[in-house]
Amino acid sequence: PNLAYSRSSYFSMLMFGTGAFMIRLIQNRCFFELQKNLPGASVRHELRQGLQRQFLKMDEHKASEWPIARCSAMLTYDVDNVVLNSWLSAFEIVRQTIVVLTLLVVVLCNSQKSRGLLVICTASTAFLFIGSFADMRFRQSNMLDLQARKRQSFHAYMAISGLQISQSREINPTYFSELELARNTSYSQAFCSKAEQIYSKHSIHYYYAQLVLTSASHEVALLVRLVVISVIGRAAYEGNVSVEEAIKVIYSMEALANVIKEFVGLWLRLSEGSPSLVGISELLISRESTEVSSTEIGKRMCDWETVSDTV
């Protein structure tokens, strides 16, 4: 009997391992097909063609606010930002939503045998969702403002750099002495360096804000894990639930916490692509842009002390 039981257990283990392998294989194949057929390059092409059409139709007044380098930044930085962080993230949100719903069903099924276990899992899941999304909601306006400032400073830096290069190549060196040319080059380089420093400061500020948000989400998930492990572990130690059930619930809650982290990352990607999406939309529908022009940003950069305090 013991030999028959061992053979049956070994056969069940093999079947379980084979089934898990096949499910993982199908999942990887479906993910490959999704990535292969996901429309990304075509969206970039359409956006760039539409933006190029708008740039060519600009009148003299509006073209002064959009130097060549700033147009290039829009065609590269903003288009890639929208496609990667806004368009493709929408498909990932659908996939992660399905994963969350599946994990919720698994958690409820694993904890339905014990009422106390069901209450603990439900409360932990609610706290995990509410804590993470409340933190994101609280920081939403700040994150969007930081990303908008980062984008504007990048546009200004590219516009100033492009204008300086174009002007320097139009200067006839025969009309100026070497000292005047060197002085002009030094001044232009210092001014462009200040613009680059402003962009770097905004980028670092946004990066630190991302770290704070992700750290808060990780701490909430860690707190939920500790509570679930301690409560369910004590229940298993006292014999109220079996060890098998405790392991199932703990593993399900661990997977759910990891998915919440993915949702926080997706939300950060959406907030990063939002200002670029708004800027592209304003240009494509030919409305009056609400963005700060590169000329205005350049004027603000003249007062370096004020800009440094603002950053």
Image (cartoon, rainbow, N blue to C red):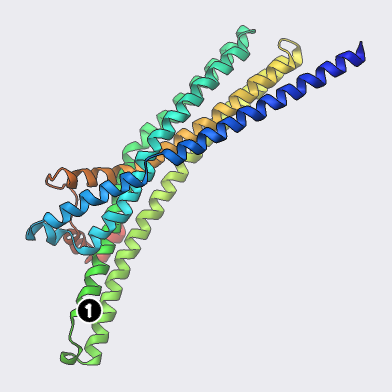
- In percent of width and height, residue 89 lies at 40, 38
Q: Seen in the image, is 29 located left or right of residue 166? A: right
- In percent of width and height, residue 138 lies at 36, 33
Q: On screen, 61 above or below 5?
A: below
Mark 1: amino acid: Ser
Q: Residue at x 51, y 38 (%)?
A: 32
Question: In front here: 272 or 83?
Answer: 83
Q: On screen, 174 above or below 42?
A: below
The N terminus lies in which quarter of the figure? top right
Q: Seen in the image, is 166 located left or right of residue 58? A: right
Using the rendered view, name the quadrant where residue 17 is placed: top right
Q: Residue at x 41, y 54 (%)?
A: 204
Q: Residue at x 43, y 37 (%)?
A: 266
- In percent of width and height, residue 220 lies at 52, 31
Q: Residue at x 66, y 24 (%)?
A: 229
Using the rendered view, name the quadrant where residue 113 is placed: top right
Q: How many marks?
A: 1
Residue 196 visible in image: yes
Q: Residues within 10 Å of mark 1 (few under 14, many from 20)?
A: some
SS assignment at label 1: helix
The C terminus lies in which quarter of the figure? bottom left
- In percent of width and height, residue 60 lies at 7, 61
Question: In front here: 148 or 82?
Answer: 82
Q: Seen in the image, is 105 located left or right of residue 72? A: right
Question: In front here: 109 or 176?
Answer: 109
Q: Which residue is mark 1?
A: 168
Residue 310 visible in image: no
Q: On screen, 270 above or below 187?
A: above
